[in-house]
Amino acid sequence: MKITYYGHSCFSVYANGKNILFDPFITGNELAKEINISEIKADYIFISHAHYDHILDVESIAKNTGAKVLGNFEIYNWLLKNGIENAHPINPGGKFDFDFGSVKCVIAQHPSSFMDGSYGGIACGFVLTTVDGNFYYSGHTALTLDMQLIPKFTKLDFAVFPIGDGLTMGIDEAIEASKLVGVNKILGVHYDTFGFIIMDHQKAEESFKNANLHLFLPKIGSTIEI
């Protein structure tokens, strides 16, 4: 599958002819200043939780593309209130089928609140099954044994994990998470954007390599194939 990285935890997967975007936070990221969000294609947008560094650009991109936007029920209501009519709720444990394939929502261990401090519902991850491959985006999360349930239902081709530490999993925890879900290809996200999540890239790559895992750290704006 083709994956485009837009910085922080925002990335897009092209699967079964559809552009699937996750956690759009671009205009607020100095490292992604070269990205023009009006040029981003999206048929679906998934939001893992309500923190501003995951939803900042969802309104602009959704209204520009007409994409269907999915998040927990609190995020769904927030989307409707902000004029995004093509919204769809999904909570942990829930599964829906769409034209790209299916998505199952799973738990993530992380807080969630909107920019005004109001409750943003429970944080989520997503397991997507498509004809081009299957993958798991954990969202922002700590390492949790709940992850070992995922391969009982879906054989994954790769996973997307936060690796910047401090506010989420770090390198060592993401390596353990990879083992729990049964993948050897990992896209790392949520690092370098802020001072407290700056990561040692060489250490990360060597640590994953020593664990016989392949860590992908694409440049912002680049597209890779996994």
Image (spheres, rainbow, N blue to C red):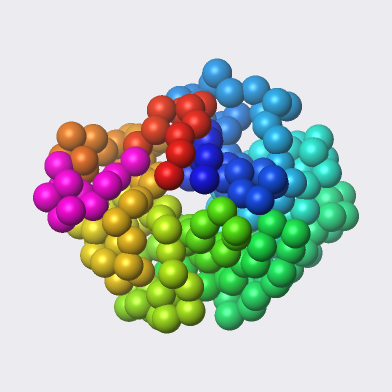
Along the viewing direction, whichever of 27 and 145 lies nearer the viewer: 145
Left or right: residue 55 compared with residue 53: right
Q: Please say if 21 is above or below 70.
A: above
Residue at the far top in the pictured view: 34
Q: Please say if 81 is above or below 219.
A: below
Along the viewing direction, whichever of 166 and 33 lies nearer the viewer: 33
Residue at the far front in the pictured view: 131
Left or right: residue 5 compared with residue 22: left
Along the viewing direction, whichever of 30 and 22 lies nearer the viewer: 22
Identity of the residue drawn at 15% across and 55% down: 211
Q: Position of residue 74 (x, y in %)?
A: 70, 67
Identity of the residue drawn at 53% across and 40% down: 2
Q: Position of residue 182 (x, y in %)?
A: 32, 67
Left or right: residue 177 compared with residue 58: left
Q: Please say if 193 is above or below 125.
A: above
Residue 20 visible in the shown view: no
Q: Position of residue 101 (x, y in %)?
A: 66, 62
Magenta segment: 206-216
> Is 148 part of what is drawn in magenta?
no
Q: Please say if 43 is above or below 178.
A: above
Q: Position of residue 41 (x, y in %)?
A: 70, 35
Residue 98 visible in the shown view: yes
Instruction: Name the image quarter holding the C terminus.
Output: top left
